[in-house]
Amino acid sequence: MGNNILSEKELAQANFYCKLWNKKIIVFGYGRRGRNVGNYLPSDIAYFVDNDPAKWQDSLNGFNVSHPDILGQENKNSVCIVVVSYYYKAILWQLQDMGYMEHVNVFNGLDFFGDILNKEIELRHNLYYNPDKVWLRGSPRIEGTCTFSGYNVVLDGSRLINTIMDRYSTVGRGCEIRNTRIGKFCSIGSEVIIGLERHPSRGFISTYGAFYLGKPTGTPSFVNKQLFEEDLPVQIGNDVWIGSRAMILGGIGVGDGAIIGAGSIVTKTVEPYSVVAGIPARLIRKRYDPKNIKRLLDFAWWDKEIEWIRKNAAAFSDEEKFFELI
């Protein structure tokens, strides 16, 4: 006779399926794992909710997404909410404020399907960026929508989120870069942070995120819409050098040819061919006079064909020769 005794995990999953039986299934979390969890549920998903306003739609037909407030209109005895998010605890608190109960009508989908969903993401990982365009040395993390133009290098321990890297740019070890566009031929040192989130310092009584963020980030939010934009994009120009442990706030632009000293905190726009350093970063000097800066910007050597760059590589270490060349 075979052994028909179910494991503890199998018993928990069987109990989970029983709770879902004849209930309206709502998935909280419209990320890549949330979109795939329906393949493992016993019946169809009624709709999705998410705390991210970028994912909200105008209707709830099919697989559209809505603000979590709509859950307040549901009959709690007839629905089950499957949370598919690493922010489960914060979302649970949010749902408990609405009267929902854990293990009664709220379940952590990652407890049951986390392993298989992670494997699916891993198998499809190369669909989100072209691995032939970038050399990932060690185990950096590439998240969200990242694109690479070619001959890019990202070293171990770094994390890129929603970032675009143009050709020949490199990122050192242990960096965190989010919502950033990096130009061509940029050199980013180790432990650099780009795209630091902002917080309000005027107009709000408290700097605590729950008073201005429309979604919970570890604790529930007290407002139902975003009242302050904390996550602004960063634009890094071409041929920019950023020293180790520098920090660049969200919403900042760094011009072509700029140099940012190690350990600097950049809070304002950095002009092209400027050298800045310090806390906060201040102008140390301009690399060239205004006339030659204009010549370099107009010439834009970084846009030249690689054959031209290789042919004239010797001039890059001789300023006088390079200015004669252009």
Image: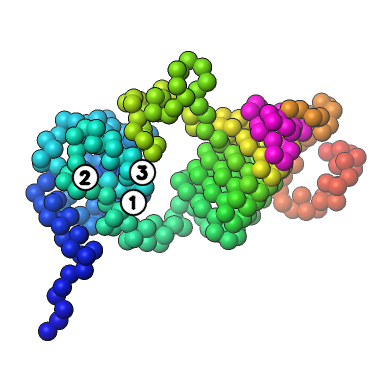
Q: Residue furthest top?
A: 203
Residue 326 located left or right of residue 251: right
User: Which percent across, then down, holds residue 197?
Assistant: 52, 33
Q: Nearer the viewer, residue 13 or 240?
A: 13
What residue is shown at x 32% (from left), y 43% (from top)?
89
Crowd class of label 1 (few under 14; some 14 to 19; many from 20; radius 10 Å): many
Residue 100 marker: none
Could you give the CA–CA distance between mark 2 and mark 3, rounded to whole angstroms? 15 Å
Crowd class of label 3 (few under 14; some 14 to 19; many from 20; radius 10 Å): some
Q: Residue furthest bottom?
A: 1
Crowd class of label 2 (few under 14; some 14 to 19; many from 20; radius 10 Å): some
Secondary structure under tag 1 reads helix
| Labels 1 and 2: the sequence-earlier one | 1
Asked whether 279 falls inside the magenta stretch, the response is yes
User: Which percent across, then down, holds residue 148?
Assistant: 56, 49
Residue hosting label 3? 87
Residue hosting label 1? 33
Tell me which amino acid carries mark 1: Arg
Residue 102 marker: 2
User: Which percent across, then down, holds residue 173?
Assistant: 63, 52
